[in-house]
Amino acid sequence: MKPILEIKNLKTYFFKKEGAIKAVDDISFHINPGEIVGLVGESGSGKTITGFSILGLIDSPGKIVSGNIRFKDMDLQKISPQQMQDIRGNRIAMIFQDPMMTLNPVLRIQTQMIETVKAHNKNISDQDAYAICRDTLGLVGISSPDERMKAYPHQFSGGMRQRVSIAIALLNKPDLIIADEPTTALDVTIQGQVIFEMQKLCKESGTSLLWVTHDLAVVAGITDRICVMYAGRIIEQGATDKIINDPVHPYTQGLIKSVPSKNKKGEKLHQIDGMVPSMFSLPKGCAFEERCYLRSQQCKHEQPSETKYADGRLFRCLNVDANS
Amino acid sequence: MSSIIKINNVTKRFVKSLDKTAKFINYLGGSYKEEIVHAVDNVSFDVMSGEVVGIVGESGCGKSTLGRMIAGIMPLTQGSIDFKDKHYVGFVNDKYQQDHLIDLKIQMIFQDPFSSLNPRKKVIDIISEAPIHHQLIDKQEKKSFVKDMLNKVGLNIDAMERYPHQFSGGQRQRVGIARALAVSPEVVVCDESVAALDVSIQAQIINLFLDLRKNMNLTYLFISHDMGVIEHIADRIVVMYLGQIVEISTTEQVINQTNHPYTKALLSGVPTLDTKKKIYEPIKGEIPSPLNPPSGCYFHPRCKFASDKCKVEKPVLKQIASNHFSACHLND
């Protein structure tokens, strides 16, 4: 099967007075049609910038330095801004973390939704656009969509607002949705509802989904594959059950072991000592070296390259035996 | 084990009083009413000495308001709170009283390590301000005292002369913990204290809490929306919904013999590290507005077991097993 999105050796740097920040540094992954892929990492690991790079939303002083982003048969870096505009919000849609920030507070929901439909389909009549919007709103589980179309964002609760932004992302039946921490700002019971809704919608429409999050537990249950990011690099990627049940990279191992439910109640949690290195002064070698229990002298000087593990997943570590 | 804090029928109401226009219209015969939010509604429970009590609930359930009242930084509307059998906040002869000596014994650690520290003060002043003000230490001892505190929370001594913005989130939270512990409290209220931290840092801070509890003999009230964290560190769990306690028991009983439908929904909604494709079965509906709560049981519009009785009659907290209380009509 041909992947719908393929990223090869993408590097997105931010050029500041203090020097270049390598927010995304040489990452490669792909998403197949209908697949749900999780992009997991802590704050500052570059997961959001990866999403922005795909959609061409990187602003100065940021720049995509090198690499290749292929969407279907198009090279997203070679196409004109006008063509990119046609893809953005149409073929690739994005859902952001905070629904309060993404919806315009002074426009009715229907204005914002119809605008999205008309932006990509100039010939559609107002009535048809309205019908599409109303149906999509019903699809994401909002009751009495006709009334709700007239409401303003502040009249919705947090979970409802997130449903509206999901509906807007779905309006043009995209091939790929990038969801950037879509449930982080929501309550537990509402988070369950939103995950349920997204799961169902992707399955029904065959949409691919890139789920960006810091929470391994959220992606464990819904994704087919996971990419784990650390300091701008994907340090491990592969099938979800393999990564969760048998991680090979020391960082992934530490992350999974430190989840409270993996520890005996009341006892000390497994912890990864130290903290994420500053992006201004990344070490020459492996960025995880300082916190790693497998570190060797070599790690200080040599950047680990992407290696294939016996079961087919990819990882970046010098001290893990690829054949074990 | 004796109880260290007793919470007796505590209620907190926020009243939005009428503005001038509404008052004037009322004067002319209009019928504007004051808006009242019952943030915490008649809550009582005991906290034993040395125990970790977890308070869980979703946003707007009143868990933070309750924590703030216990920490003495927000007055009560009704009821009282005792510390070691001594009234410390509450009403005596209809007059609100607060014992500020006991205030020191109950400290609070906040959610956001970015906004809870004064950005213009050095760490040494942040930590030593309260103990010097309350004459627990001399000004001369300041340096050695702060050194001691930083040691306890696992920070380097050179952190003393730095400002909050020079630290990462996890380190800042450690400063906040040191500040709370500086007045040698016996009870610490942690309001979502690990929610803003990254996963790998979160484990470090939880471990620090567990260590400090052992070394300093602390009692914790741990407020969180995260069932995973609460399950790990709490001895007892209080589940709140719309300002009321719906279930309270030991952690084992709440997790394994869950009684209240809301607690069940909370537990099943938590994503786990289970790679079996989980089909989420979410509970329906939204959390109702506390301005206008439903009749009867507050949970009935979302509950799949709701009967006619639930719509009319409010369930009371009843004992269903030893140390296990739940407010649900299904137990009758």
Image (cartoon, rainbow, N blue to C red):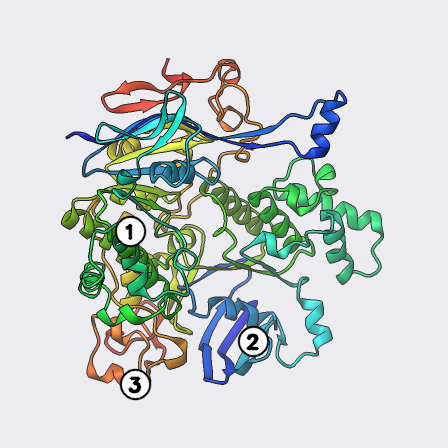
- Tell me, yes or no, whether dots 2 and 3 are on the same chain: yes
Name the amino acid type tagged 2: Ile
Residue at x-position 37% and y-position 75%: A278
Task: Give how far across and how far down residue B183 sits, in percent.
Answer: 24, 50
Secondary structure, mark 1, is: helix
Cα–Cα gap, marks 2 and 3? 27 Å
Q: How many marks?
A: 3
Q: Is residue A24 left or right of residue A101?
A: left
Figure quadrant of residue A304: bottom left
Tell which of B71 and B27 is nearer to you: B27
Label 3: few (<14), some (14–19) or many (≥20) C-alpha neighbours in 10 Å: few
Task: Give how far across and how far down residue B20 sits, in percent.
Answer: 69, 34
Tell which of B102 and B308 is nearer to you: B102
| Residue matched to label 3 | A302
Q: Nearer the viewer, mark 3 or mark 1?
A: 1
Q: Chain of mark 2?
A: A
Q: Is residue B10 left or right of residue B22?
A: left
The answer to whether any part of residue A292 appears in the image is no
Task: Please determine whether, in this image, residue A83 is positioned above or below residue A185.
Answer: below
Task: Give how far across and how far down residue A2 sits, in percent.
Answer: 55, 69
Q: Nearer the viewer, mark 2 or mark 1?
A: 1
Q: Is residue A219 left or right of residue B2?
A: right
* Mark drawn on residue A99: none
| Residue matched to label 1 | B180
Task: Please determine whether, in this image, residue B148 is positioned above or below residue B83.
Answer: below
| Residue matched to label 2 | A69
Q: Nearer the viewer, mark 2 or mark 3?
A: 3
Cα–Cα gap, marks 2 and 1? 50 Å
Label 1: few (<14), some (14–19) or many (≥20) C-alpha neighbours in 10 Å: many
- Tell me, yes or no, whether dots 3 and 1 are on the same chain: no
Residue at x-position 25% and y-position 71%: A291
Q: Chain of mark 1?
A: B
